[in-house]
Amino acid sequence: MSLNRPCAIVLAALAAFAGAATATPAGAQQADAEPAAKPAAAAADARTAAAPAAKADPGTYGFDPVHTRVMFALSHAGFSQAIGTVSGAAGTLRFDPADWRGAHLDVQVPLTRLDLGDGKWNKAALARNLLDGKRWPSARFVSERVEPAAGDPQRFEVCGTLSLHGVDGPLCLQVKFNQLKRHPLPPFHRTAGFSATATLSRAAFGIDAWKSVIGDEVELRIEAEAVRDKYVGDSPQGAAEAGAGEDDARQDSVRPDPAPPTPANAQPEPEPRR
């Protein structure tokens, strides 16, 4: 027993010495690990920097001429608000639902399809002293900026230039985005729906006849459906019909050649009789 105890002490001391010699300090392990980790992290950062930022591609939508309609209302001698509609609009809308500020709208409305509910009234509204439908068969609106409404992601103000009756003037639309989804009926095209309102002065666009009978303020209400990759590039139906037999440039233009000057003794066309 006296010999075994010293031997055990010596063996334990040798084992402890060997363990201390082969062990790696914690600081050394961390120092050795960092050089390997840094190149890997740097490579990942380089790949991220080299990759282009993901951007949503704005879709291109054409207006459905059947389900896009403009309603207008203006005073009839103070007795009522005369109501009319125009169908057959054509145009293009490009937008990204994630960023409406980049949206762009270009639409034409065929005034020759105006309907006030009476043939004589329709003819009078398109006469030379009012809309002058022969010279100016369509109106055109081109957006310049889109501002989302504060606190409501479904509403926007779309401001741009309205070309009407040979005059370019500013116009802002208050737009409500209804929905964007696949249409429930065949051929199931992706469709966007909108409702919009606006107010304009007809005199500001040179349409100032019959001031005592026809109000100056015109209220607009627009219901529109735009279909992705369909109807793009179409012409307004009414303008095409009015320009039948003429060259294409004449049909699609909202800037026809000016008409000859009106004689000094010319009388305005009478208001239709009731």
Image (tube, helix red, strand yellow):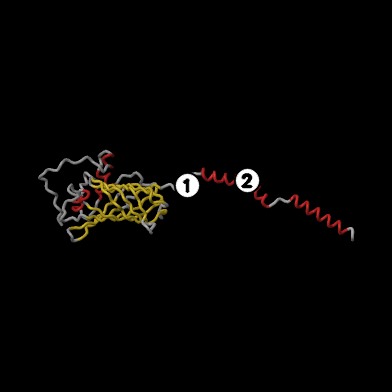
Say which amino acid is labelled 1: Ala
- In the displayed structure, does residue 1 sit left or right of residue 201? right
Kindly identify the residue that appears in the image at 89 percent across and 60 percent down.
2
Residue 164, x across and y down, in percent = 24, 47
Residue 36, x across and y down, in percent = 63, 46
Spatial separation of the CA atoms under disc 1 and disc 2: 32 Å
Q: Nearer the viewer, mark 1 or mark 2?
A: 2
Residue 108, x across and y down, in percent = 29, 47
Q: Which mark is residue 154?
A: none
User: 118 or 258, which lies in front?
Assistant: 258
Residue 71 seen in this snapshot: no
Say which amino acid is labelled 2: Pro
Placement of the N terminus among the 4 image quadrants: bottom right
Dot 2, crowdedness within 10 Å: few (<14), some or many (≥20)?
A: few
Residue at numbered disc 2:
35
Residue at numbered disc 1:
54
Is residue 163 depicted above or below 12 in this figure?
Answer: above
Placement of the C terminus among the 4 image quadrants: bottom left
**The residue tagged with tag 1: helix, strand or loop?**
loop
**The residue tagged with tag 2: helix, strand or loop?**
helix
